[in-house]
Image (cartoon, grey):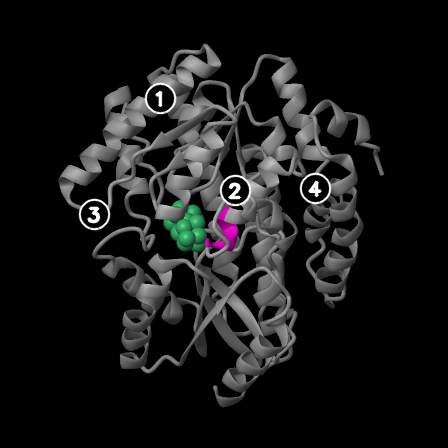
Amino acid sequence: MTDYRQMWTDLDMDLDTHDQLCAVLPDAFGDTYLSQDNRPENMAFYDFVVSEIHGVRPAELIELQKQGGKVFGTFCVFVPDEVVIACGGTVTGLCGGSQFWVPAGEKVLPSDTCPLVKASLGAHFGKTCPYFSVADVYVGETTCDAKKKAYEILGADKRTYVMDMPQMKRQKDVDKWTGEIADFAAEVEGVTGRALTPENLGAAIRLVNEKRRALARVFEARKVTNCIPISGKDALLMVQIAFFDDPARCAEMANKLADELEQRVADGVSVFPAGTKRILVTGTPLAIPNWKLHHIIETSGAAVVCEEMCTGTRYFENLVDEGADTLEGQFKALSERYMKNNCACFTPNPGRVEDVVRMAREYHVDGVIDANLKFCTLYNVEKPSLAAALEAEGIPVLALETDYADNDAEQLRTRVGAFVEML
Ligand code: BJ8
């Protein structure tokens, strides 16, 4: 394994504290992932990335910076990667998915804040994540209260650009997001020193669409009923890593995995025994390395076959129209695609309920688990209406609220086990 200590020192990271994280991650990954039987061979790439999660990709980003490239760190799937890529920049996801970062986050945020936001700020201020350290600029968005206030705190410490997210989905809101994308483009041009053109933006739109198509192929293979060709944990890992990876390589590796899964489907090769209950998980994102819920479900007699969340279908569903040949038209096409995302930040938000019901059918699920992070008002308020819609369709649903700590794992296991039992 390569030694990245000099790189982390150069990034001004807190090496002693970071060593503690490096010490626990391999065991956590081994227990959760490597213990699975009959995994697709193409998961080897994702296992390798995790084994060097704080080394191999940050080293690539530093190389890109040496060649004049800029790194944009993002926290939400509303930020259009295409604009950054078109200007020769690189995007990396930044959401924190580990309890490890929460205490440092609680030094700058109230403790009753969503763990995702606390972990993100903890990773920044604790200097224990190279992706935060390497980013030239953070890009925030006004989706939820916790995030939009957190960006003020981050912005005092590093250049942070915030996109003003509409809260409704009227035509004037789509137009407003088009304008926000145009403003963001000006910011990206300023940071990168490169001009956006219809040609480079068109190429970036096609590239990110390719990535979306590849991820969608993997999910398509999860819809079949003759077998379950990949575990939910492995599919989740693929999406989590997609937020950090180079988009062309991401598409290539996802397509290879999809090829293998399609062959498995043809051969009837399953990771789980016949009759295993099929679960759709919906709710707040599961940022890497948050594998807690999937692990509990998949060691309780069920399999996750779909994630209706931003670390799932919302990341790749809906393509950007590639037909526009002016920047104005391309900004509009980008806005139209991104505004189709049914995040709970919108009011009203009937699209999410419709999506979950549709996907419950498409993925032939036996039940839905609606799992939200503690203190996420947006998703927690949607729980009853989502449950009512699913019950009206005859689809069993279990609502859960959790965080990154392990102390509710046994309680979750009991509830998930009882739910699976009654399906
Ligand atoms: S598009 S889901 S990535 S906002 S869980 S930080 S909402 S308090 S993450 Fe999200 Fe964009 Fe929406 Fe997706 Fe706030 Fe809730 Fe925490 Fe959240």
Q: Position of residue 69 (x, y in %)?
A: 56, 17
Ranked by sequence position, the earlier of labels 2 and 1 is 2
**Mark 3 highlights which residue?**
168
* Residue closest to the eye, 157 or 40: 157
* Residue closest to the eye, 211 or 293: 293
Secondary element type, mark 1: helix
**Mark 1 highlights which residue?**
185
- Amino acid marked by disc 4: Ile
**Mark 4 highlights which residue?**
53
Give the alpha-carbon distance from disc 2 to disc 1, as whole Å: 31 Å
Give the alpha-carbon distance from disc 1 to disc 3, as whole Å: 22 Å
Q: Is mark 4 within 8 Å of ligand 1?
A: no
Relative to 36, is 241 on the left or the right? left
Q: Quadrant of the N terminus?
A: top right
Q: Which residues are magenta?
A: 113-117
Q: Is residue 118 above or below residue 160?
A: below
| Image quadrant assignment for residue 335 | top left
Q: Residue at x 58, y 36 (%)?
A: 124
* Residue closest to the eye, 286 or 39: 286
Q: Is residue 390 magenta?
A: no
Secondary element type, mark 3: loop
For the residues bearing labels 1 and 4, Cβ distance under 8 angstroms: no
* Tag nearer the camera, 2 or 1: 2
Ranked by sequence position, the earlier of labels 2 and 4 is 4
- Amino acid marked by disc 3: Met
**Mark 2 highlights which residue?**
108
Ranked by sequence position, the earlier of labels 1 and 4 is 4
Ranked by sequence position, the earlier of labels 1 and 3 is 3
